[in-house]
Image (spheres, rainbow, N blue to C red):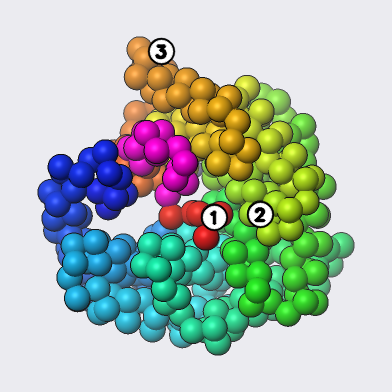
Amino acid sequence: MLYHVAQCPLFAPSRDAYLRAARRLVDACLRAQERGGGEADTRAAFLLGGAGVYAVAALVYRALGLPDFARPLGKFRELSEVCAPLSFLECGSDELFVGRAGYLCAALVLKQRLGMEVLTPAQIKSICLAILESGKQYAVKKRKPFPLMYSYYGTEYLGAAHGLSSILQMLLSYYEYLQPADQELVWQSVDFLMDQEQNSNWPPELGETIERENELVHWCHGAPGIAYLFAKAYLVSKKPQYLDTCIRCGELTWQKGLLKKGPGICHGVAGSAYVFLLLYRLTGNSKYIYRAQRFAEFLFTEEFKAGSRALESVYSLYEGFSGTVCFLTDLLQPNQAEFPLFSVFV
Ligand SMILES: [Zn+2]
């Protein structure tokens, strides 16, 4: 969050102070990581472990002009070996928070922010192939009528947090590294996921029926997160049906996206509002800025403060205020807005 705000020209007078604070924090994280802190199986995790620490350290060091940024970058590269074995995690090796999709997502962020590819083509291809092979094997073993499927702790999630949509999104982000036959499998899977839509939303798990009273409209589960896959599919293929699906995600979020689960980006108001900034960038329609602004205003109302669940992780990027600050900053620069660490425009 400090890095993100420091990159915004409107906060230029505070840039150095933010980056120095970011460095203090990330250095503490690096020391914990070097001490062997954290579980061995979260070493290659982007959002919950080592890969994320090294990636953010490289970004902060580089922004401060420190030549040292090559060191965390080297550590990051070494982790590609960790996530190469097909089942390197027992709980599921492919999803976004701890798995291979997350590692690829981190490499994408680094490429975008540092202006260089941090992994070699061979490393990228081997990780993509592992994701594809793992998905094929699972789909065959579970006799799925479609080519790629995954599970995390035994659950076949569909959404952005641990599910099929963000895994497919990452494969599309490295589309040119895939063989034509594998590209075809990815498109079949994207279309399969599109077919699982129920009234502009998706259930958290494959095969579930959405019940109106406990429908989830979150970034982590449901349309506000799955929208990013269809945005990416549209950007890669230019097929209007993917943009149409993304727009339906936005309409549902406008109707149902004011949440009681806090201000955050995972299952909170800012996470919903980011869909409008995504749609603004895709369509240029200022209606979406209006909608994002209304959601932002809601965060400061008594109704929200009185009705919202108390925060446990106040500083968390996903659940706390850090992601919310990223959203509010992006509202000031909507032409560059993107969900933190999850770009479809790279
Ligand atoms: Zn969530």
Give the labeled residue for mark 2.
235
Between the residue at mark 3 and the residue at mark 2, the CA separation in whole angstroms equals: 38 Å
- Nearest to viewer (mark 3 / mark 2): 2
Classify residue 185 as left or right of residue 316. Answer: right
Q: Is mark 1 within 8 Å of ligand 1?
A: no
Of 269 and 282, which appears nearest the observer? 282
Up-down: is 116 above or below 318?
below
Which residue corresponds to the image point at 59% horizontal and 36% vertical from the top-left? 284
Residue 286 visible in the picture: yes
Give the labeled residue for mark 3.
303
Classify residue 51 as left or right of residue 253. Answer: left
Q: Which residues are magenta?
A: 325-340
Q: Which mark is residue 345?
A: 1
**Upstream in sequence: badge 3 or badge 2:** 2
- Going by the numbered disc 1, the residue's amino acid type is Phe
Disc 1, SS:
loop
> x and y percent of residue 105 in the render?
49, 64
Disc 2, SS:
helix
- Going by the numbered disc 3, the residue's amino acid type is Glu
The answer to whether mark 2 and mark 1 are in CB contact below 8 A is yes
> x and y percent of residue 34 in the render?
23, 76
**Upstream in sequence: badge 2 or badge 1:** 2
> x and y percent of residue 35 in the render?
21, 75
